[in-house]
Amino acid sequence: MQFHLLVDEIRHLSLPEKQEMRNLLDKFLIEERRTEIARNHEQSLEAHRRGELEFSNDPARLRQLLEG
């Protein structure tokens, strides 16, 4: 379904249906973000295992690391 047709269909829903649609979208977005965070976490762990990460609590060194 094309996006503009979907938007038009949603526009014609009842208020309770729109609220349910919003709740579903919120849940879908939360789940996608959780998946993204988990994927980033796994990538970070793998980089740590390969010794590609450097840790520091020195602000000047952290700035250097961020700036490349």
Image (cartoon, grey):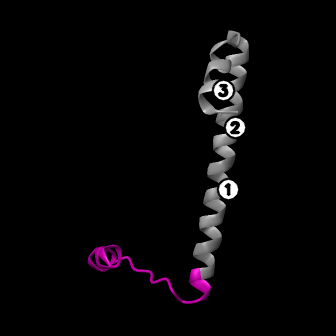
Quadrant occupied by the N terminus: top right
* Residue 48 image offset from top left, x and y in percent: 57, 83
State how far apart marks 3 and 2 are (Cα).
Answer: 19 Å
Residue found at x 69% / y 37% = 27
**Helix, strand, or loop for circle 1?**
helix
Residue appearing at x 66%, y 62% in the figure = 38
Quadrant housing residue 22:
top right
Magenta stretch bounds: 47-68
Residue 67 as seen in the image, left or right of residue 33: left
Q: Quadrant of residue 45?
A: bottom right
Q: Which of 17 and 6 is in front in this view?
A: 6
Q: Mark 3 points at which residue?
A: 6
What percent of the width, then of the height, locates residue 24?
71, 31
What residue sits 65% from the left and 34% below the top?
26
Q: Closer to the N terminus: mark 3 or mark 1?
A: 3
Query: Label 1 sits on what residue type?
Result: Thr
Amino acid on which the number 2 mark rests in the picture: Lys
* Residue 55 coordinates in the image, percent (x, y): 44, 81
- Left or right: residue 53 versus residue 20 is left
Q: Mark 1 points at which residue?
A: 35
Name the foreground residue: 62 vs 37. 37
Instruction: Find the residue positioned furthest to the left.
Output: 60
Secondary structure beneath disc 2?
helix
Instruction: Give the quarter of the image for residue 49.
Output: bottom right
Please report contact status of discs 3 and 1: CB closer than 8 Å, yes or no.
no
Q: Note whether 49 is above or below 28 in the view shown.
A: below
